[in-house]
Each structure stands twice: as C-alpha cells, then as structure tokens.
C-alpha cells in the first residue's frame, strides 16, 4: 500500500496537483461539491455492492447520489413483454436510501440495453405507444417521489443518420416518429411529478465538426420541446472523455452550456470518466494525463452556474466498463486507468483533480 501511495504522489506531481494533497484528503468529494451547491455521485451496481466492501466504503465516503448502472435499464428488469422484475432495482434504492443518498434513474427510453424479446415487440405505432406507456408508467410510477431525476430519453440524437432533424434512427422513432420523445417526457411527468426530467446525450464537449453537429441538433431538439411545453428540465452531458483526445476547448463547452441554460434548463454531467486509450504504458504518465482531463473539463463546466450535478460513470478501476469497450479499451491490452480510485481502491491523481475542481468552482 505504501508503494501505491508513493506512486500516487508521483502522479500528483506530474499532474501539477501535489500542493493540494493534504487539503484534498480532508473531505470526501460529495462534501466538497455540496459546499459549492453541486450534487456529486457515481454509478454503482448490485453486483459491486455485494462483492466489495471497499466499493461500499468509497461510495459512502464520496457520493451523495447513486445511479444504478444496470438495474433500471430495460434489460435489467423486463424479463418478458408482460413481466417486470424489480428485485435488483429495489435493492439499489434501499442501499442508497439507507445511507441518505439520492438516486438518479437511468434510463426510461434507450435504443440499447434492451431485452432479447424486444426484437419481437410490435413495430406499429399503436403497439409501440402501448409498450412505452406501460413501461414508463410502471417503472417511473413505482419509484415516484424517490428519484432526484430520470434520464427519460437517452441518446436520441445522431447527425450521421442523415435526418434533417438530427435524430437517431431507433425502433421508437420508426414506429412513432419524433413525437416519441415528447410522449416519453409527458408520461414520465404523469408517473412521477417530483423527479427532474432529463434528456441525456453524449459527444457534446469537443470542438470537432461531428460534435458541433450533435450540439446543434441537441439545441434544436430542446428548443422545440420547450416551445411545445414538454416537461424537460435538464440536459445531461455524458462526458466520456479521452485523455489522448484532441479538440477540447473550454469556451466551446461553456458556450454550449450557456445556450442550454438560456432555454431555462439545468445542465448535469451524468456519466463522467476518462479513458487512457492512446497513451503510453507508463502508469504515472497515464494517471497524470487522466487527472488533467478531469480537471480541464470540470473547470470549464463548473464555471457555468447552470451546471448543478456531476456523476461519475465508475469510481474504481476494479469495475470499469472500459476494458470491455472497443471504443475505450487500450490497444496494448493493459487495463484502463480511468477512474478516481485504482483497482486496489487507492486514490489516484484523478481523485485530487476532481476535488480541486470542486474547491475552485463558484458557488451556486
């Protein structure tokens, strides 16, 4: 463990964060965020909770909010077209609530993480509408009053599908047209009047032509929803970052957040992580680069008062999703070091980078 501590300090020095070590050690990330009026949390699964006492410890120490990573997706609780199985989701709600943590729901409508039977689901408008109505009313209604927010529609935009409106070609869109998004939000509001309702999207942070097209499409979608009186209250920016990626310009992200805020909406960072894909094998160099990416992104996002919530998409390298993703895993086969804690649950430079970003953030 001492060797890991020395490694962490070398990484901090390389990241330019060593002077903050003593101060950042004093408080958990949720406490530092709360002092600035920001909610901080992480995704977590039942498997992680039951397998690892260390995961339970760091989630309690650092998170004011839990996002069930699998249990509230369709594949996590829809074993059949007629049936729902909420055992795992109920477990995660109890786990969070017993510790005084808030919960985010992810996600009511998404074109991925669907159960196998969905391939045989109705594709006509009446059948798909009935399917969505039953799903949203049942799931959101079951947890009404217990969710801080719901990702109502996840990843609805894909400019490269070449539609004039920029929407992604999904089974929901093909059956119901663009109106499926409005429908989902209205159903969610009816089922849970208290939860904040969120449109969640990825690929919004870089100054690249592809991501600029996505930002334009997202803003157009949100403007239309606001104009039509759809009960959308926040945009979720997923923020799956790459430490070796080029094209991050703080002013681009800040301008986008301000444009969303100008519609009267809040902004959440909903799935923050940083892959070290493309970086050399040296651990200290990788950790330093990942820490710098967290800090640069958060400094820009948190400078905007509309940004009210930050959740990580993984808190320890022990359970990262990235090693199984062709987009995020390393080409050399080494384990990705993406998260604030390493695979032995020791704090990395990324933890201190996040801590200092919260310390430097303006008050909400």
Image (spheres, helix red, strand yellow):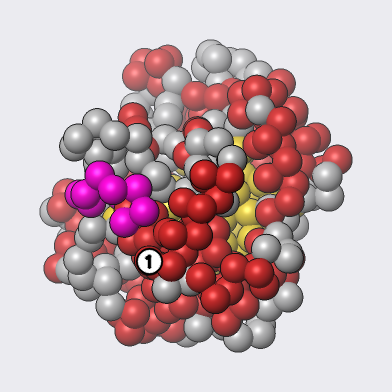
Specify whether residue 160 is in view. yes
Specify whether residue 33 is in view. no
- Residue at 28% x, 48% y: name it: 282
The magenta stretch is: 276-285
Q: Main secondary structure of the magenta part?
A: loop
- Residue at 43% x, 78% y: name it: 300
The residue that mark 1 highlights is 14
Q: How many marks?
A: 1
Q: Residue 116 location in percent, x, y?
A: 40, 16
Is 329 left, or right, of 129 in this rendering?
A: left
Is 116 left, or right, of 140 in this rendering?
A: left
Classed neighbour count for the residue bearing mark 1: other residues with Cα under 10 Å, few (<14), some (14–19), many (≥20): some
Q: Residue 241 location in percent, x, y?
A: 34, 57
Q: Residue 180 location in percent, x, y?
A: 42, 47
Up the image or down, 9 lies above or below 16; here it is above
Is 71 left, or right, of 191 in this rendering?
A: left
User: Which of the two residues, 74 or 283, is positioned nearer the viewer here?
Assistant: 283
Dividing the image into 4 quarters, which one contains the C terminus?
bottom right
Residue 14's image quarter? Answer: bottom left
Up the image or down, 133 lies above or below 152; here it is above
């Amino acid at each position: 463990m001492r060797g890991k501590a020395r490694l962490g300090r070398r990484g901090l020095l390389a990241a330019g964060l060593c002077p903050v070590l003593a101060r950042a050690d004093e408080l958990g990330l949720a406490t530092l965020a709360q002092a600035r009026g920001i909610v901080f949390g992480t995704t977590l699964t039942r498997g992680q909770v039951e397998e690892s006492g260390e995961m339970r410890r760091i989630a309690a120490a650092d998170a004011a909010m839990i996002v069930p990573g699998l249990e509230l997706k369709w594949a996590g609780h829809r074993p059949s077209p007629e049936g729902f199985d909420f055992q795992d989701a109920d477990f995660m709600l109890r786990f969070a609530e017993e510790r005084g943590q808030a919960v985010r729901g992810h996600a009511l409508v998404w074109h991925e993480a669907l159960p196998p039977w969905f391939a045989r689901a109705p594709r006509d408008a009446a059948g798909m509408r009935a399917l969505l109505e039953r799903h949203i009313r049942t799931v959101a209604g079951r947890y009404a009053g217990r969710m801080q927010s719901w990702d109502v529609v996840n990843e609805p935009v894909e400019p490269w599908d070449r539609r004039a409106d920029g929407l992604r070609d999904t089974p929901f869109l093909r059956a119901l047209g663009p109106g499926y998004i409005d429908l989902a939000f209205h159903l969610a509001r009816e089922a849970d009047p208290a939860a904040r309702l969120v449109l969640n999207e990825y690929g919004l942070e870089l100054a690249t032509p592809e991501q600029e097209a996505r930002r334009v499409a997202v803003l157009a979608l949100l403007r239309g929803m606001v104009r039509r009186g759809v009960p959308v209250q926040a945009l979720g920016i997923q923020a799956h970052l790459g430490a070796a990626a080029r094209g991050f310009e703080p002013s681009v992200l800040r301008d986008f957040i301000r444009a969303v805020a100008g519609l009267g909406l809040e902004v959440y960072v909903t799935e923050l992580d940083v892959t070290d894909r493309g970086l050399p094998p040296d651990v200290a160099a990788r950790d330093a680069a990942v820490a710098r990416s967290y800090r640069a992104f958060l400094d820009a996002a948190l400078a905007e008062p509309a940004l009210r919530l930050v959740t990580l998409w993984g808190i320890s390298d022990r359970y990262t999703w990235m090693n199984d993703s062709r987009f995020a895993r390393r080409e050399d086969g080494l384990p990705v070091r993406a998260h604030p804690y390493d695979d032995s649950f020791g704090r990395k430079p990324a933890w201190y980078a996040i801590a200092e970003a919260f310390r430097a953030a303006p008050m909400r």
